[in-house]
Image (spheres, rainbow, N blue to C red):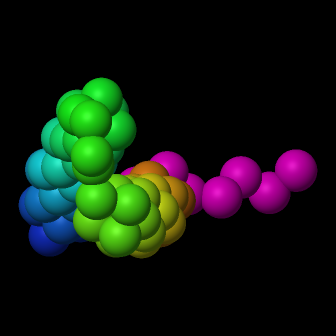
Amino acid sequence: MSNLDDIDRRERRQLLIKLENEHAALDEEVALSTAIAGFDQLHIGRLKKRKLRLKDIITQVKSSIVPDVIA
């Protein structure tokens, strides 16, 4: 394994941490928004869609970090 592979893997792990933190923040924002009386359904819907997109990206990054194992 070369140093470039290590750097690339390290960068992907850092990206993964950033994305997971953003996903958690959105989760908290959705929870707070739904707790407020008169919340905006459209805004919450957009937050949830953004969370789903982030989750997809997180899954892709995770799969790029952990290689497939041939069974």
Please, which residue is most extreme toward the front here? 38
Q: Which residues are magenta?
A: 64-71
User: From the viewer's perspective, is 62 left or right of 35?
Assistant: right
Nearer to the camera, 62 or 19? 19
Q: Where is 57 relative to 27, above or below? A: below
- Rendering coords of residue 59 (x, y %): 49, 58
Nearer to the camera, 11 or 20? 20
In the rendered image, which quarter contains the N terminus?
bottom left
Residue name at image x 28 percent, y 65 percent: 43
Q: Main secondary structure of the magenta part?
A: loop
Q: Which corner quadrant of the image does residue 2 belong to?
A: bottom left
User: From the viewer's perspective, is 13 left or right of 18?
Assistant: right
Q: Is residue 6 visible?
A: no
Q: Is residue 53 visible?
A: yes
Nearer to the camera, 2 or 27? 27
Residue name at image x 27 percent, y 49 percent: 39
- Rendering coords of residue 34 (x, y %): 34, 38
Residue name at image x 18 percent, y 66 percent: 8
- Rendering coords of residue 31 (x, y %): 32, 33
